Amino acid sequence: MQYITHDDLAERPGARELAQVATKEGARQVATELMEATLRGGDRSTWPADQVAVADDALQRVQDAVTEAESLIDGYLAKRSYPLPLSPVPKLVTGWVRDIARYLLHKDRGGKEDSDPIVRNYKDALKFLGLIAKGEFSLGAEDPITSNPNQLDVRFESAPSVFDRTSRRAF
């Protein structure tokens, strides 16, 4: 997990949602408090070993979704020659990892795609990643400059101005 931390995930989407979607089918859902402790590295000694094992399995499912999301993002960023993994990680990228991983964890979710915020956020992330790959959107100051044969890259440098508004009044 390069672009998002367990604490980020505990904040949003939160331990409750992650416990709901990441608990293995057929297993008793991980308690929210246990999932919170698992995400944040808290004390889990009061929980039975079998429940801790289910929480660990759920955490592994979350990490797998995050790894898949980060790989997808890196694939788009590689088209623009970004040095990977990104460091520092722009907040936009952390949000995209969250949105894509959340979508992957909810893949069996029923509902209308056009009104579902999880699907909408996933599609928005992919849209922006596509714009980055085409060079139409920038992550900011760390954006690599690439030469595009259809686009002229012109830069101007000059000495400081000889005259400015204050110096002209002296004449």
Image (cartoon, rainbow, N blue to C red):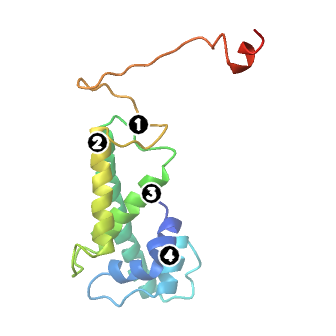
Q: How many numbered markers are drawn?
A: 4
Q: Is residue 91 above or below residue 148?
A: below
Q: Is residue 104 above or below residue 161?
A: below
Q: Are marks 4 and 1 in contact (CB under 8 Å)?
A: no
Q: Position of residue 155 (x, y in %)?
A: 44, 19
Mark 3: give few (<14), some (14-19) or many (20+) Cα within 10 Å. Answer: some
Query: Residue at label 1?
Result: 83
Distance between mark 2 and mark 1 Cα atoms = 14 Å
Distance between mark 1 and mark 3 Cα atoms = 16 Å
Mark 2 vs mark 1: in front: 2
Which quadrant of the structure image shows residue 31? bottom left
What amino acid is labelled 4 in the image?
Thr
Q: Are marks 4 and 2 in contact (CB under 8 Å)?
A: no
Q: Choose the circle earlier in sequence order: 3 or 2.
A: 3
Give me the residue at 46% from left, 59% from top: 4
Mark seen at residue 102: none
Mark seen at residue 38: 4
Which quarter of the image is occupied by the N terminus? Answer: bottom left
Q: Position of residue 119 (x, y in %)?
A: 27, 69
